[in-house]
Amino acid sequence: MNRLFDKLIVLTCCLVGASRLPVDAALVASLCLSIASSTCVETLRNSAQLRGSEIASLAFIAASIFVPALVPFAPLALYDAARGFDRESPSSLLGRVALFMVALAAHLCSGNLSAETIMLSTVFAFAATLLSVRTTQVEREYARNATVRDDLQERTLLLEAKNRDLLERQDYEVQVATLAERARIAREIHDSVGHQLTRAKLQTDALAIVHEADPTAAADFQSVGRAVDEALSLVRASVHDLHDDSFDLGLQAHKAADAIMRGSSVRVAVEVSCEHVPANVGACLLAVMREAMSNALRHGRAGRIEVRCLEHPALWQLSVLDDGGARDGMAASDMAAGAAGTDASTGDRHGTSADDGHGASSDPAAFSGQFHMSDGMGLASMRERVEALGGSFSAGPRRDSTGWRVFASIPKERTDAA
């Protein structure tokens, strides 16, 4: 829009300069040619096309040496020629200006144009050139400012994202510290107040037996014993509440995942969608989760582990998937043979049997889905924990892709009843 406004001003000046000449076909043709040439420059965006427009403006200025009617409209051509002005290499623009001065001098000497017309054309030409150079500088500064603004906006977005991550991490640490403090308070109450109340209860019971001959004293000791017993029950309930509140399955799952990823190249994705998980259920699911991730890292050579813990209306569900063996491109039979040799020499030193780790079965059929579960330490421990809460447990190779799958589900009715 700035260019169009500038050219409208320059064209007005050109018409003022041309008003000194007689109106004929040559003058009208010069006006139309200058307008067409200037319009093409504004509509062209390709670099090659712009280069052609520069050549056209140069040809227009050169033709003004021989055609006097072109001289009053030369400022438009000079305006377009100054669009690509560069302070480091101004020779192109200076050459066009010098060519225009030659045209003015030639027409002044030949008497084709009056001195007044030449003077106006000179003033308008320099004004158009300066106006074009100034507009070019403004456009370049605007483009530079837009680039800086975009960079600042991008950096601002990055800083905001990092700030959100830091705030989330801070909230996570605060919540972990809060839960740890609740657990500590529960332990302190249980170890100090609970023991003292239990001791007082035993003493009052003993004194009541000792003073059975005195009904009044025995009744008083029994009353005190009932009060201590009620206090002890309240303390037990408070301790259990604090202990239950101090356990957050989501936080503990992320901590376990961070511990697995620390010092290894494995990536762990955790998704926990459970609310108000009882402490015994949460401890069971967390233990299964840790054992499954540990097996995936140590035995399966997994590159990625996916942990999903979901709550359904009737049960809690845990699944741990990994891509064990996928990174090395090992065949199932090779994994089985290697695992068989490892088990023959190491046995259960890592807390797992031949069926406990990934690919730790010497039967290649296990990798095609025909998996036979034995009572290894790791898998047996996970199975016992889940089945103790009335749940079901399964582990074996994935059917859809290379890797291992551990699955556990615990019903809510049995845990609520417990």
Image: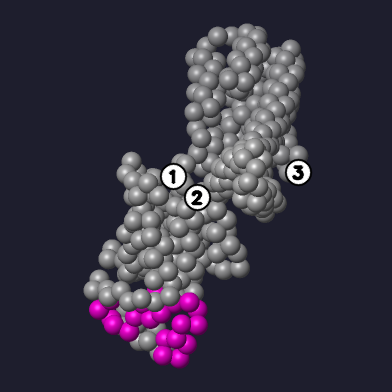
What is the x, y in percent for residue 258? 57, 59
* Coloring basis for residues: one colour
Q: Earlier in the sequence, mark 3 or mark 2?
A: 3
Q: Nearer the viewer, mark 3 or mark 2?
A: 2
Q: Is 293 within the magenta?
A: no
Distance of mark 3 from mark 2, alpha carbons?
75 Å
Q: Position of residue 54 (x, y in %)?
A: 58, 36
Q: Position of residue 222 (x, y in %)?
A: 61, 41
Amino acid at the residue labelled 2: Ala
Q: Which residues are magenta?
A: 343-367
Image point 43% across, 75% down: which residue? 377
Classify mark 3: residues with Cα within 10 Å, few (<14), some (14-19) or many (20+): few
In front here: 118 or 155? 155
Q: Nearer the viewer, mark 1 or mark 2?
A: 2
* Residue for point 45% across, 91% down: 345
Query: Image height check: is 282 above or below 115?
Result: below
Which label was assigned to residue 88? 3
Mark 1 vs mark 3, CA separation in Å: 64 Å
Question: Of the residues tagged 1 and 3, which is closer to the observer?
Answer: 1
Q: Are marks 1 and 2 in contact (CB under 8 Å)?
A: no
Could you say which quadrant of the image residue 319 lies in?
bottom left
Element type at mark 1? strand
Residue holding disc 2: 279
Q: Position of residue 242 (x, y in %)?
A: 59, 44
> Circle 3 — which element?
loop
Q: Which mark is residue 273?
A: 1
Is 307 on the left-hand or right-hand side of 394? right
Three-letter residue code for mark 1:
Ser
Look at label 3 and name its amino acid.
Answer: Glu
Sequence-first disc among 1 and 2? 1
